[in-house]
Image (cartoon, helix red, strand yellow):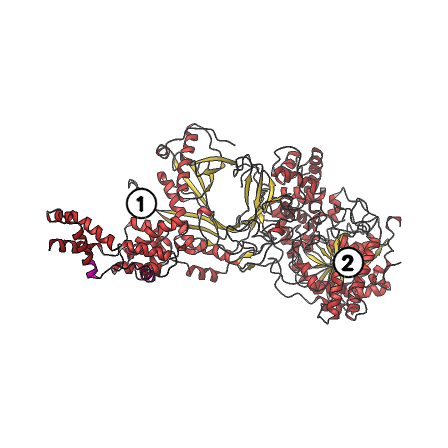
Amino acid sequence: MSTTDVELVDYDEAVAEFDPVLGLEVHVELSTVTKMFSAAPTEFGAAPNTQVDPTSLGLPGALPVLNAKALESAVRIGLALNCTIASYCRFARKNYFYPDMPKNFQTSQYDEPIAYDGWLDVDVPASEDGSKPAFTYRVLIERAHMEEDTGKSLHVGGSTGRIHGAEYSLVDYNRAGIPLIEIVTRPLEGTGDRAPDVARAYVAALRDVLRSLDVSDVKMEQGSLRCDVNLSLRPTPDSPLGTRSETKNVNSLRSVERAVRYEVSRHAAVLRAGERVVQETRHWHEDTGLTTSGREKSDAEDYRYFPEPDLVPITPDPAWVEELRAALPEPPAQRRKRLQAEWGFSDLEMRDTANAGAVDLVEATVAAGASPAGARKWWTGELSRRANAEGVELSALRVGPADVAELQALVEAGTLTDRLAREALDGMLAGEGSAAEVVESRGLAVVSDESALVAAVDAAIAANPGVVEKIRGGKAQAAGALIGAVMKEMRGKADAARVRELVVERVGG
Amino acid sequence: MSTISRPEVEHLARLARIDMTDEELDRMAGQLGAVLDAVQQVASVVSDDVPATSHPVPLTNVTRPDVVRPGLSAEDALAAAPEAEDGRFRVPQILEEDA
Amino acid sequence: MSGVSELVRWDAARLAEGLRAKVVSSEEVVQAHLERIEAVDGPTSGENPDGVHAFLHVDAEGALARARRIDADRAAGAVLGPLAGVPIGVKDVLTTRGMPTTCGSRMLEGWVPPYDATVVRELHGAGLVVLGKTNMDEFAMGSTTEHSAFGPTRNPWDPTRIPGGSGGGSAAALAAFEAPLTIGSDTGGSIRQPAAVTGTVGVKPTYGGVSRYGLVALASSLDQAGPCGRTVLDTALLHAVIAGHDPYDSTSIPEAVPDVVGAARLGAGGDLTGVKVGVVRELSGEGYEPGVLARFTEALDELRAAGAEVVELSLPNIVHALAAYYLILPSEASSNLAKYDGMRYGLRVTPAGDGVTAEQVMRATRAAGFGDEAKRRIILGTYALSAGYYDAYYGSAQKVRTLVQRDFAAAFGQVDVLVSPTAPTTAYRLGEKLDDPLAMYAGDVATIPANLAGIPGMSLPVGLSDGLPVGLQVLAPQQADDRLYRVGAALEARLTATWGGPLLAQVPEWKGLSA
């Protein structure tokens, strides 16, 4: 089972010597309210074994009935990935024993997937240092099929949480039967040294597509989008495919990239040492950045697939499929390009916006009247910080696009300074009301009463004769002290630029 | 006479997760061989152009709406568990990772 | 009938009439059957009970409570179903909430399901009173009920003989007057063959006609629950209660159930003018006992006398049906029975020693929990589905299935129903076929084709051979279950007249092994 310990080969050397070939299998949990084959609920984080019914618990006599929404989602995903939708397909049983699988077979699709032969164009960004250019890579999709998730085991005893050395396990079947779509690529060839970037960009692009379809939460950290990375090396692009490893549990974009890099280095080391790469499942460890050997794929692994007799064949009505196709949202990559042009964002600004998951929010904020730059600044800046601090999604914050547009309008009208606007935001996030209401209730508006400002400036001049002397002696920067004193007196509710003008005016006069 | 070897039966028993004694394996090999003899005719009576029938009644596209129906309480779910702990099914240590 | 009420001799239709007319109460009827069970059924466990042992579990208190509730409802003028208040036995392969469901296996000993099968819900909804659960071959694998982990059921006609299987309990309960109605399940003949060898009536409905939700699966594409009774009309009345669309079963037929009760009443007139009956040449010659063939031939004469046109025809591919069945069934069963692993419910056997793993527990549990026949079929199915053998075995068997369906389609283009003897022999002696699985499998030759094709089939008694009942099988096209009842009722009416009463009037009073 264990792999020979070898010194890893430096990544750059490895890709200079070998041609990497990738394969990606992504499991997406659909955000249906019931399971794939029964009406049990699918709430995330519920108390253990409370989201079950006879079917999802695999009780004797229980039968599956397909979730119509899951089928529709599967077809929409297939269409968004430019797949052919099967005119006839069936479910199959994949037979193997495992304690977290209630029936000891997984209901899946085998040789008749609902969608097949598609593609997704992936924009691979330039490397950070700019040494490697941006490009578009077309990932060929072999298939997308429907299946059910398994339960979850908690390993107790030994080094708790790990399977090895555990004394026993505790199984929760809440996740069992949750609808999954497995999306399998064809081998990704010709990526060369950019294999890690392509892998990451593909998963990111796929996530965006799924998000645009509103079929899944696509939260990698919660496991609603899970990625298995297959990798093999071959001497040259003309050589036959090498033996591949299948790395599981790769559950962040950064990990996808790192896992590919690691496996490239590891495979290269094994091959350089003249050894055989073992076809096996490997596990990715986020903390150490390493993969470790899991289970060797062997002939003993015979899943004995056969058509699921308890579920009837699916023959999607072509008219229905065309209806779904016509109603697909604009592909995210295309939409992003369109919006970037409309908003006049730089590549970097657009990427920041996308990475913050703020494209929709910026769009809605602009629609509510804000300038694109203003909307971007709020969502990728202050609001992203607040969301991170609270550990929630941007969209879960208490302020929405309309609120942000209103706030930004107050800034642009000169009613609020940036600092006052942030304070107003505090109030809005605390549920004190709209921007205008918070400005009113907290008394945040910039003091535009000229006489009050003049009085404050004059008071500052009178209190700081030494400073006044310096300014008159030509040290213009000394004015800062006076401005600071005025702002303090006004509790920040003054326009600093106007205060500066007044200081210069009054000192000079 | 189609024979099924003892190692083959042993492999099948392992796949099917059934412990068998040597005596059982021997007996099973003999009986399975006889049954296979009797059933292997099926391969010779069908041709490639005959479609397979997986479902005896020609129904298609049976689905249900995505609407929650009350399922089992955790108590009902765990009532028959040989062992339970903290609302979960307690099972012996699992050696292999998930497939 | 010493000491036990004559009520147990009443058929379900008569009981229903008596209940409706308030001549009897459900409580009296249920009490009479419970006493009868107490008198003849013997222990419900143990190695070699001297009773009929048709029941694995009897819920006397629950049944009486339900009966009293039905009586109260009736007294209050509630609208009740035609069979409300009539007791019934349910094969232990259907889940019953709060009542043990073992499938005749150690694996599920003591398991109390948290939900009712749809069929059981229908029974409750129609006001039938469930007496308990009837004995069966383990997980419905067998043709004798000897493969029950809890001891065999005996044939009320002869306690040294088997009552058929797998639903021997449901059939014997009828023949021993322990219940007027029972539910069975039929994967390859498990309703029809026990009916044949006990002189009772059993129907396997069209696949998808009765919900499989809560029917513990043996072979999903073959399994079908169905009604068992002492008369064709009783069976039809029960059929009408349990049949119909169920959204919990994807393979359930959405169309309306044919009028089986109407067909049974029509047929009872004894006139089959205009009905074409086909005799299946492949299912009535070699391998069939002379006594069985004699009764069958006489029955054909009765059909002719009733005005039916009887023709012989050939279904050439059904000679391969048995082989195909014994590949499809084990394959599906090996997968359906995988869930019994000691992790979530049922038996768990933990081998001695430290550091025992889940896999070791699964293997030990399945070794201890399954009997020989179950193990044989699981291993055979595991083999037939294996990568290297799938095409030759499972794949080919599914193609034979297509050929069998085509044969039936062609035959039903020419005739309305097909007939054959239900089984080649009368009841075996206990133990006779125990170590010869192939011989036991061969007894299913006539019943299996209907399961492969998904068509309905009935067995009804057509007389005795050496004092043991012989059954005739009627087959009809999918969703034409009503034809079974029309033809069956007509034949029953004529034969009953010949015998001077129901065949079951001739069943000897139960004396156990001392007989």
**To which residue does mark 2 refer?**
C472
The chain that hosts pointer 1 is: A
Quadrant position of residue A401:
bottom left
Q: Amino acid at mark 1?
A: Ala
Q: Nearer the viewer, residue B53 or C275?
A: B53
Quadrant position of residue A441:
bottom left
Q: Measuring 42% from the left and 36% from the top, which residue is drawn there?
A: A289
**To which residue does mark 1 refer?**
A134
Q: Where does residue A475 sit, x and y in percent of width and height?
A: 13, 46
Q: Where does residue A86 sit, x and y in percent of width and height?
A: 49, 54
The answer to whether residue A354 is magenta is no
The answer to whether residue C273 of the structure is visible from this angle is no
Q: Where does residue C238 sit, x and y in percent of width and height?
A: 72, 63
Viewer-nearest of labels 1 and 2? Answer: 1
Magenta span: A432-454
Q: Secondary structure at mark 2?
A: strand
Do marks 1 and 2 share a chain? no
Q: Nearer the viewer, residue C19 or C471?
A: C19
